[in-house]
Image (spheres, helix red, strand yellow):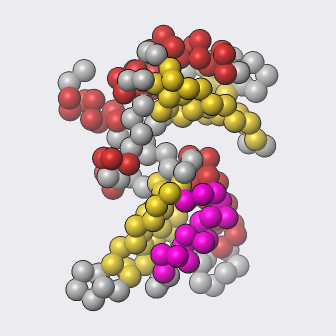
Amino acid sequence: MSKESLEKAIKVNCTTTLFFARMGSIKKEELKQYCEQFGPVKDISMMVDTETQRPKGCGFVKFMTHEDAKLCVEEAPKRNRNDPHKRNWVIEWAKSSQIKEGDLDKMTIYISNLNQQNDNEDMIRQKFSVYGNIEKVTTIENSKGMFAFVKYEQMESAIEAINKENGKEWCGNLIVVEF
C-alpha cells in the first residue's frame, strides 16, 4: 500500500469528533457542560475571529468514545427542539479533513451492527486476528444493539480489517467496520 493510499485510508472516519455550528456566543465551558450530558468530553476547540477575538459560533467537540459522540448527534436535536437558543444548532460528524492528524486513532477499529446472540469477544478476536496481532477487544451492549472496539498493534492491520470487513455479512448481520 502506498503512503498516499495509507493516509487516505486512515482518514476514513474520525469516530469521536463532532462539528457544532450556529451556536451564537456560547462559551467553551458552557458547550462542555452541555455535551457532558452525552458522555465525557476529551477536548473542545472553539473558532474565534482572528481580528476581534469574538466567537464565531462554531467549534469541534471530541468525545472520549464514539458511542457518546453518536448519542449526541442523535439525541441533541431532539432535546434542543424546544429551546430557542439551541434549536438552530447544527451538530454533525466532523469531516476527516477538519481533524488534526494526531487526533485520529489509527490502530483501533469500531465494529457496529453485531449480532447480540452470536458475537462475543472471543469470536470477534478470532475473526479479526487474521489481519494482525490484537491488543484488546472491548464489546458493549445497549438498547441500540452491540458494538465492539478492536485495538491492533499495527496501523496496517486496522486498515486491512476495515478494507476487508466493512459492509460484509457476519452472523446474519451486515457489519460496519471503521475508525
139 or 79, which is in the foreground? 139
**Image quarter of residue 106:** top left
Q: Position of residue 176 (x, y in %)?
A: 55, 31
105 or 18, which is in the foreground? 105
The region drawn magenta spans 27-41
Figure disc tally: 0
x 27%, y 29%: residue: 6
Measured along the vertical axis of the image, is residue 164 above or below residue 178?
above
x 53%, y 55%: residue: 63
Q: Position of residue 76 (x, y in %)?
A: 64, 65
Measured along the vertical axis of the image, is residue 118 above or below residue 105?
above
Q: Is residue 35 magenta?
A: yes
Measured along the vertical axis of the image, is residue 179 above or below residue 68?
above
The outermost residue toward the bottom is 52
**Image quarter of residue 115:** top right
Q: Is residue 2 left or right of residue 75?
A: left
Q: Is residue 170 left or right of residue 22?
A: right
Q: Position of residue 70 (x, y in %)?
A: 59, 51
Question: Looking at the image, can residue 165 be seen?
Answer: no
